[in-house]
Amino acid sequence: MSIVARALSILLAATTLAGVLAPTTARADVVCDEVTRMCTIEDGGGGGGGGGGEPPKVPLCSSFPPVAVPEDPPEPDWIFIECRLSSTEEDTIGLWVPPRESAEQLAWLLIARLQLKPVEIGLTPLDPDVMTAVGIPVWLWVDNPSRTSWGPASISAGGISLTAKVTSVTWTLGDGTSLRCGRGTEWRPSMVDRNGMVGESPTCGHIYQQQGRYAVRAVAHWAAEWQGYGESGTIRLDVGSTRQLRVGEIQVIVTRGGR
């Protein structure tokens, strides 16, 4: 096995220098549950890296108090918002709403304006066209974390302040394994040991036991803390991204000379 590990680690280092994974854009589906106060952004299950998800949709007009009016607000501190008339329509209308009765709904609107997106998946081997092998440690990490893919991202409007950031990432590896990690540790070619072998990740990784093609999925768990008008709360949001990984077997044939 040491011969196999060393052979693949050299392959990993060589392909790393050739190029890195380029993120691809996939259309996002946003599902929000008013009961659990949870939203989920899916990247469509594509085979790309991070993907550029769409922001959560603006809330329905029915989620605001019935006293909302389309024009001429009764009080000067009322706030103008955009909302959708139905869940099947993308077009929005404008309404004036009383802020103190709508603090949480306004916080949901701020979440939409943040335009959060899925993380870019980092794993070994870096080149998506190169397969790894059974028994070789696969490192997992969040590649190129940014304000909109990792946080913290802050925004204030309409008397509400909100700060969102990722608290953890759940990795599903396609073979029944699930891991909960932080950002993970990025693997670099210089990290092979003196024997040219790839060790296990110190923070987040996995070793496959069978060959095959696996869908590696990273779901970033966001927590958005908001406050305003004497109220506060937390909105939780899951943003998912998927990448395909091929796992093969390397067989070493030993031949002996002589008759």
Image (cartoon, grey):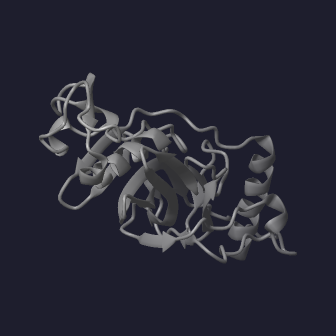
Name the residue at the front extreme.
Answer: 75
Question: What x and y, as percent, mark residue 178?
Answer: 41, 70
Which residue is found at the position 71% from the left and 61% from the top?
8
Q: Quadrant of the N terminus?
A: bottom right
Question: What x and y, as percent, mark residue 23?
Answer: 59, 38
Q: Nearer the viewer, residue 94 or 91?
A: 94
Which residue is found at the position 52% from the left and 60% from the top?
165
Picture quadrant of residue 234: bottom left
Question: What x and y, as percent, mark residue 172?
Answer: 42, 63
Q: Nearer the viewer, residue 42 or 134?
A: 42
Name the residue at the right extreme.
Answer: 194
Name the residue at the left extreme.
Answer: 66
**Residue 212 can be seen, yes or no:** yes
**Residue 213 can be seen, yes or no:** no
Q: Quadrant of the C terminus?
A: bottom right
Asked if residue 122 lies left or right of residue 40, the reply is right
Q: Nearer the viewer, residue 78 or 108?
A: 78
Question: What x and y, as percent, mark residue 21?
Answer: 65, 42
- How many numbered callouts? 0
Asked if residue 41 lies left or right of residue 66, the reply is right
Which residue is found at the position 45% from the left and 48% from the top?
242
Asked if residue 200 lies left or right of residue 51, the reply is right
Picture quadrant of residue 12: bottom right
Say if 75 sits above or below 89 in the image: below
Q: Nearer the viewer, residue 20 or 105?
A: 105
Which residue is found at the position 37% from the left and 46% from the top?
41
